[in-house]
Image (tube, rainbow, N blue to C red):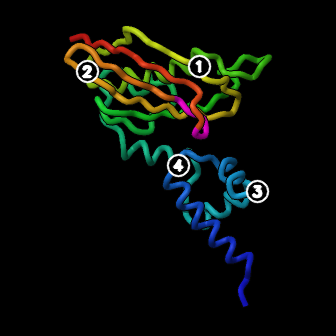
Amino acid sequence: MFDIARLLKKDRQTRLVQTLKENPFATDEDLANMFDVSIQTIRLDRLELGIPELRERIKSVAEQNLDAVRSLDIEEVIGEVIEIQLDSHAFSVLEIKPEHIFARTQIARGHYIFAQANSLAVAVIDAEVALTATARIRFVRPVKLGEKLVAKAVVRSRSESESKVRVETKVQGETVFTATFRVVCIS
């Protein structure tokens, strides 16, 4: 006789492993909603499967995928850098906390969203000194307290003196901010 709960648990755990391979930035809350179980169930599944918590997963991905940033100190990038391949692409994550929001509306202040994108666009450039010359930005929707911003910067073109970098910021796969930066390199 089959234990249906056990079978469902094994299926859920298999899907959990696959989901985290595809998106290592998923929170326990995101996963609980996705699998329609409690956060505690997700934590127990992760523990049983030897999957670390979000912060450790992010740290692990970052350690494997970081080139040496030259244009600024890595600590100067707003958000946590997850991956960076100089002159190619970069990712960072920023969780919106109380210090990032307007108290009355609980909406993130735009300059934090812009700063994450701008600092990532500069960091991805392989140069001793890189500065933003121009930026075309678009706020798509307000970002709220507790949301995690995942920014992806892609170098679209590169010459000796300047680069064009496109940054797209998402919350759970939904685009919330886009920007195109012209970054100049100074020797």
Disc 4: CA contacts within 10 A as few (<14), some (14-19) or many (>=20): few
Residue 82 lies, in percent from the top left, at 44, 38
Residue 71 among those drawn in magenta: no
Of mark 3 and mark 2, the one earlier in the sequence is 3
**Above-or-below relation of 133 to 17:** above
Q: Determine the CA span between mark 3 and mark 2.
A: 47 Å
Residue at image position (58%, 51%) is: 53
Image quarter in which the C terminus is found: top left
Residue positioned most to the top: 133
Q: Determine the CA span between mark 2 and mark 1.
A: 28 Å
**Residue 139 got which mark?**
1
Tell me if label 3 and label 4 are in contact, CB under 8 Å: no
Residue positioned most to the bottom: 1
Tell me if label 3 and label 2 are in contact, CB under 8 Å: no
The amino acid pointed to by label 2 is Ala
The amino acid pointed to by label 1 is Phe
Magenta highlight: main SS: strand
Tell me if label 1 and label 3 are in contact, CB under 8 Å: no
Of mark 3 and mark 4, the one earlier in the sequence is 4
Residue labelled with disc 4: 23
The amino acid pointed to by label 3 is Ser
| Magenta segment boundaries in residue numbering | 169-173
Tell me if label 4 and label 2 are in contact, CB under 8 Å: no
Of mark 2 and mark 1, the one earlier in the sequence is 2
Disc 2: CA contacts within 10 A as few (<14), some (14-19) or many (>=20): many
Residue labelled with disc 2: 127
Residue at image position (32%, 20%) is: 71
**Above-or-below relation of 80 to 134:** below
Q: Determine the CA span between mark 1 and mark 4.
A: 24 Å
Residue labelled with disc 3: 38
Of mark 1 and mark 4, the one earlier in the sequence is 4
